[in-house]
Amino acid sequence: MASENILYAGTVGQGVWRSLDDGETFHRHCSGMFMEAQVRALAVDPQSPDYLYAGTDAGIYRTQDGGERWERLQTPFDSGNGWPSGTAVWSLLLHPRKQNLILAGTCPSGIYRSTDMGMTWTMAEAALTPECPPIKFSRVTCLMADPLDDATLWAGVEIDGVWRSRDYGVSWERMTTGLSSLDIHSLLILPGNPCTVIAATNNDLNISRDEGKTWAPQHVKEFFPHSYCRGSAMKEDDPTFLLVGNGNGPPGTTGSLQLSRDGGRSWRKASLPVAPNSTIWTFATHAGNPSLIFCASINGDLFRSRDGAESWEKCGHEFGELRSLALVVK
């Protein structure tokens, strides 16, 4: 039986959209949600693919039917009426192996955790810096689970460095020695003992081969078109095959997609059908179909590969500002 691929897109100002034809056409699916929400994070329940969570400037929403209907979850940082309350959700993690554990990263920066699938929340013990120049408020841009150690979680904060938890996100420690910048945009966690961590920042890629204790800048400006690095992803069936979004700034006016087949030791530029209109910002992959990969620029160009990043097509639908993608394969 052929698999069904469902792609979700989180936008700034137009809520969530859904595609049933691999990104060629989309329809808006925001029933129950603030229609003009800024959706910066999307996360699929690893046990129940019809359950999807959206992190927005109007709280956290959940759908139990693949986006047909959304409900807002009560959180400690929500104003209670679904309207922006001064705290926006920028990142979500549904733990792939610890059932019922969800983490949310916010702006101003904070990390919140729920052990009952979002019914109740507590704030994690993390001495994050909530304000920073020049962006005024720092934000938790990414939350990641270690691929081998269930209790170890990672967070990237813009602008406050890399943070690590050894207790499922209850408490956190800052891991920044050697980073080229504290402006963390995304993280990749490569399995190993110890694991390798790759941090994308505003001025470089940084690699740690000792679980975040020390970092080595990679000086990507010498071989990338630009030093600004944003989204990143790993091919689902090959943890040494990495993808990184590059561009000339946020949002930027042009972008590139960089590929590595050796865990970040060497890179080449992917051949996209047209030059992206801005920085490549986000990716979507799924273990159920590792050859299907999506990447998008922040200004709405959506690209698709059906052969594991060997070749790329530009999808038919164009968005305004696009911040998050999620892929479901049934």
Image (cartoon, grey):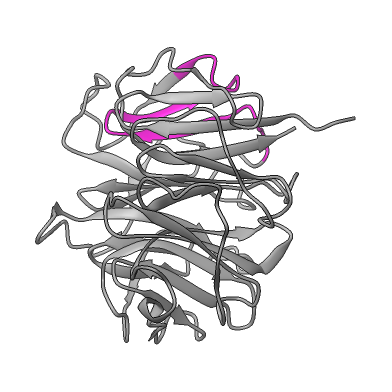
8 on left or right of 60: right
Q: Is residue 6 above or below residue 271?
A: above
**In this rendering, position of residue 225 left or right of residue 209:** left
Asked whether the viewer can see residue 40, the reply is no
Q: Quadrant of residue 177?
A: bottom left
Left or right for 115, reference 112 = right
Tell me which corner region of the image, top left, top right, bottom left or bottom right, holds residue 45.
top right
Q: Give the vertical position of 17 relative to 198 (above or below).
A: above
- Which contiguous range is marked in magenta? 47-70
Which x, y percent locates residue 24?
A: 59, 27
The residue depicted at 44 percent of the width and 41 percent of the height is: 324
Q: How far from the left and from the top, in percent, is residue 107? A: 23, 47
Residue farthest along the right direction in this orientation: 1
Can you say whether 155 is above or below 293 in the image? below
Residue 321 visible from this viewpoint? yes
Determine the residue positioned at 59% across, 23% down: 66
Place of residue 86 in the rendered image (x, y in percent of width and height, measured from the top left) = 16, 36
Task: Write the residue at 44% across / 12% down.
Answer: 31
Q: Position of residue 248 (x, y in %)?
A: 30, 60
Q: Which residue is more in the foreground, 264 or 165?
A: 264
Is residue 66 rendered magenta in the image?
yes
